[in-house]
Every structure is written in C-alpha cells, then in structure tokens.
Image (spheres, rainbow, N blue to C red):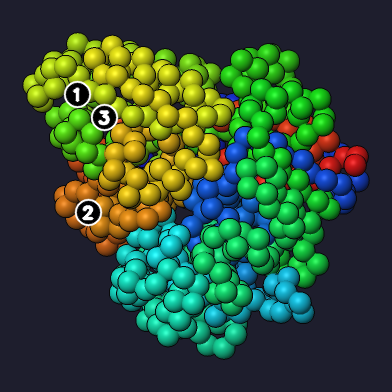
Amino acid sequence: MRNRRPLALASFVAVLALLVAACGGKTSGGTSSSGSGGPKYGGTLKLLGSSDVDHLDTASAYYTVSYTLERAFARQLFSYPASTDTTKANTPVADVATEVPTTANGGISADGKTYTIHLRSGVRWNTSPAREVTAQDFVRGLERLCNPVAPVGAPGYYENTIVGMRQYCDGFAKAGQDAASIRSYIQSHHVAGLTTGGDKTLVVHLLRPATDLTNILAMPFASAAPVEYLDHVPDSSDFRHHTISDGPYQIVTYQPGKEIDLDKNPAWQQSADPVRHQYVDHIQITEGQDEGPVQQQIQAGSADLEWDTTVPTADVPQLQRSEDGRLGIYPALDTNPYLLLNLQSPNNHGALANVKVRQALEYAIDKVAIGQVYGGPSLNTPLDQVIPPGNIGYQQFDLYSTPGHRGDAATCKQLLTQAGYPNGLVLTDVARNAGKHPAVAQAVQASLRACGVTTKIVPVSQADYYGKYLNDPAASKRGVWDISEPGWVPDWYGNNGRAIVEPLFDGRTYGPNSTDYGDYNSPAVNKLIDRALASTDQQAAANRWHQADLQIMRDAAIIPIETQRNPLFHSSRVQNATYSPFSQNFDITNLWLNGS
C-alpha cells in the first residue's frame, strides 16, 4: 500500500481488491447467502443508530449516513451498481440516463466539452398524479445547488466544470433567503452550460474536458428536483416534511433525531430502474441509541442494520474468532478521523492562523492511541498526509515524523514556544457525543495535554455537528470551536484526484455548508487544483494532486490521524447485504429479508 510512486487507476483497482481479500474468510463481507429460491419480497427492514442526517435535501446532504437514505428515494443520471466486484461497484452506470455517454455513441463531443444525455422513460415522481421525471428536473436540481440557505458542500465540482455555473452561483448568493426569492431567481436565471432538448434530453457544456463528469453527476447532489421543491426553503423543516421521491421508496415519517420511516413508492417501476430494487415493504430507521445497544439488538434479531454506528471495537475479535458470517470488514480508503483546525478562530489571539503553531501541533498527536479506539492496527493504519493510500495522487511522505506515530510532546512544546506560546493554548474541541467519537476526543485531549495544550470538549449531537458548527462560517469565525475530529471518505474512487483535495482545501469556495471547514485558503494549492483539473494526462494530474498534498501538509492545514477498515454487522435474516463504499454501509435497496 505504501508505494512511493503515484497510484494510477489500474493499480487502484488492484489495491482495493487486495484490501477486500485481506479481510479474509467469512468476515470479508460482500454479500450474504441469498438463501433458497432467490430474492424474497416483504417485511420491514430495521436500522438502529444514534443521530439524524446532516441534511435531508439532496442539494446539501453530505454525510455517508445521508447517502444511505438518499439511495432509497432520490435518483441521479448515473449511479453505482450494488456489486462485490470492486471494479463494477466503483464504475458509474446509467441510472435515469439511458446510457453512459461516450464519443463512440455520440454522447460526448469530439473536443470532450459537450455531453448529450438522454433520459429513460418510466421514471416517475410520486406526485398525484404521478408524472415523468424530465431533463428540466435535473437542471433544476443542479441550479438549486448554490441556493443561499443550504448550498452544496462541494461547489467546486460544478463551478469548476460546467459553463456558467460559477456566474450563476455568484448571483444566487445575493438573492433573498425566503422561498419566493429563491424560486424567482431559479425561474429567471439559468446556467449557460445546462440546456435541454425536450423532456428527455439534457446537454451539459463544460469549461474543459472532464473525464470524471459521470462521477460528479452520480453524486446525490445532482439528483433531479421536482418543481414543488421551489415552494420550500431548501432543507428547512417545512421541506423535510415534503420530500418527493422518484426512487423505490418514499419518506412517510420524519421525526428529527428520532425516526425516519419509508414505504414503497407506488410510482416507481422496476423496469425503469436498473440499479435499485424494492424487495422490502418498509424501512424503519430508529435513532437515539449508541453502538453497544445497537449491536446487541442486531445480534438478537430485533434489528437488522446499523444506521450511523459500527461494530463496537471490543466485539470485533470475538466475532472474527467465531467466523460469524454476519460480520463484514471493509476498506474505506479514507482519512478518518483527522484533527481539524479552525484557522479563523479568534481564540488565543488567533493562534491557529499561525502556521508555526499548527506545525507544532502536528507533533502532538498519538495516532496509535486513537487507533486503539477503532480496534487497533488490524483495522486502521496511521496516516501522515491528506491523500490516503488507494487514491489518485497518493505518495507516502511524513513531514512531522514522531517515534512509532506516538507523538513527540517535547518537539511540540519547543515549537509552540518558538511560535510565541510558551504557556500553551486553550482550545475548544467540538465532538460528536455518540459512538467512538467521545473516546477519540478524549485521546486527542490527552495528547495535547502532554504538549501543554488544554482542550475543552463540547459534546454535540451528530445532527448539530455539521450544520451548527463545522458548516457554519459565523460560528467558526466567532471561535465557537477551535478543533474537531471529522472524517473524510472520497466522493468516488478510481479517477478521483479531485474528490479529496478540492472539496476540503479549495478556499475559493468557502461559505455556508463548505467542507473546507477551517477556511484554509492557499493560492499555491488553488493553482495546483486548477492545473490538475486541466491535465488530460492522468499521471500528470496525479503528480499535481501530490504536490497539493505536500503544500497542504507544509501549511499544516489539518492533522491526519489514520485510514480505516470498517466493521459492519447485519442480522441473520438480511440477505444479499452488499457493501456500498459511498455510504460506508449496506445498500438498503438491494437486500431482502428471510422471514417477516
């Protein structure tokens, strides 16, 4: 894995296959036995977890847990099939589109800058009466991304790719934040690079060729949006109670932080959906429980899947020894967790804006101790850079080496003194209050204490964690938080150079809902992002992503901690439990139940 050469696409597939194989035996995951007679229909799939989604609106939802839900009720032009074949699972296929555009089928122009996408018939909204999803619905979905209330978390994917998207978004930011103003702007302004040829043809004009456009359009952000969504402020409480579905399931109950229920969407047709199925009758998501009770109930059979938790660390060894076929351990190729630094915090006289302070803190963290929270070296590996192994642009380096990745308090103290902080710092750490997150925050606290830095842990719910803290520029600028421990899963795999660096570190797109949480903005990195995106040669692009990684770490924008393999568990009655790397969970639209 720690190959010093850039990891190209072909080797990515090989590495991921090796990772899956390395899980070994019955704990490798994949799919459960389908039982006799093939798929079965009916029953209620029960998921248990601790907290709510970050957003319910596809325009702004940006959390693996949200992806689990979106898979069931929202569709995209392209999507990823449920498969244990890693190449297939990570390659976009036609969803609402009739086929993936290529130059051979006429879907991509000779210069690579125009995509013509045809929509299949039979994809319908669950309105009364049901009606067909149109190309204009996809245009509306893309136009809603830069609304001024709950905008997309990765605007660069679209603004740096589609003609006129940046100008459209710049204007939208000045619109009013009520439903009427948002509707008026969308209806009176248009993205120059998005045109339609009737109800079933969408044409996308690009600023430059983008070989990852189908990946970008496969993200739930790019879901179709019905015209009724213009009646509501994006992702408002009112919106969350009026979602409309074109997927196999529809949301029938939403109680924030408590429960989400889905039933079959009567307007959905299997013949018009090559990616999802409608095997179970109902899906019930119950929140408010931590990972221990969740695990107990799944093992007992009173629940089926984890919602936003994983198998408790202490339970993994026994499940592995017993070769329990319900356990799966899956490579994430992620950066999870990492220590986030709020560069705009006014606390400590703005200390975190000082690169020398941040570089000192790079030496403080005992990454092995944090790894123990997640099961130790069998499930995670210390990480020293932004781009994890298995992603384009990865080259191993370590600018802040410590013995055995256990931290170096003496060096941290020395550098803090040189930076003008001989008496240390007092930092506010906002941490999620469920699962393994409290233990992670405590391990960080212990590491920083050894360096002379005091942390005050502020526990918050998952539902508030992003929206009220990390994604809120006003809260960040007030210094409501200084540090935190989020994680990052690449938005896609394979040709995914931009899926890490751009959303996390392109400072030009910082604003509400941005995933550049700490407001890092480096002209040098921004230039490397642009050069990488303009590269037509994958090796040249990989080298530029690596150079960006180096610069980000020189600036100590974050403190990487580890990359993980995720232990998941399902009940005995769950069949065909196929892992989705995008949700870091099983695909709820492709499994069925034995028994009711």
Dot 1, crowdedness within 10 Å: few (<14), some or many (≥20)? many
Q: Earlier in the sequence, mark 1 or mark 2?
A: 1
The quadrant of the rendering that contains the C terminus is: top right
Q: Where is mark 3, residue-wise? A: 397
Which label was assigned to residue 296? none
User: Which of disc 1 and disc 3 is earlier in sequence?
Assistant: 1
Three-letter amino acid code at the position of disc 2: Asn
Q: CB of mark 3 within 8 Å of CB of mark 1?
A: no
Q: Identify which residue is drawn at 53% across, 18% down.
A: 375
Q: In the image, 35: left or right of 413?
A: right
Front position among marks 2 and 3: 2
Determine contact: label 2, label 3, CB under 8 Å: no
Q: In what element is the residue under mark 2?
A: helix
Q: Where in the figure is residue 283, as x and y percent of width and height? A: 76, 48
Residue 391: x %, y % from top left: 40, 42
Question: Which quarter of the figure is the N terminus placed in?
Answer: top left
Which residue is depicted at the point 73% across and 54% down? 253
Residue 95, quarter of picture: bottom right
Q: Nearer the viewer, residue 26 or 320?
A: 320
Nearest-to-viewer mark from 3 and 1: 1
- Residue depicted at x 8% and y 21%: 418
The residue indicated by pointer 2 is 526
Separation of residues labelled 1 and 2 (CA atoms): 24 Å
- Of badges 1 and 2, the one in the foreground is 1
- What is the three-letter code of the residue carrying label 1? Ala
Q: Which residue is mark 1?
A: 360
C-alpha span from label 3 to label 1: 18 Å
| Residue for point 39% across, 43% down | 470
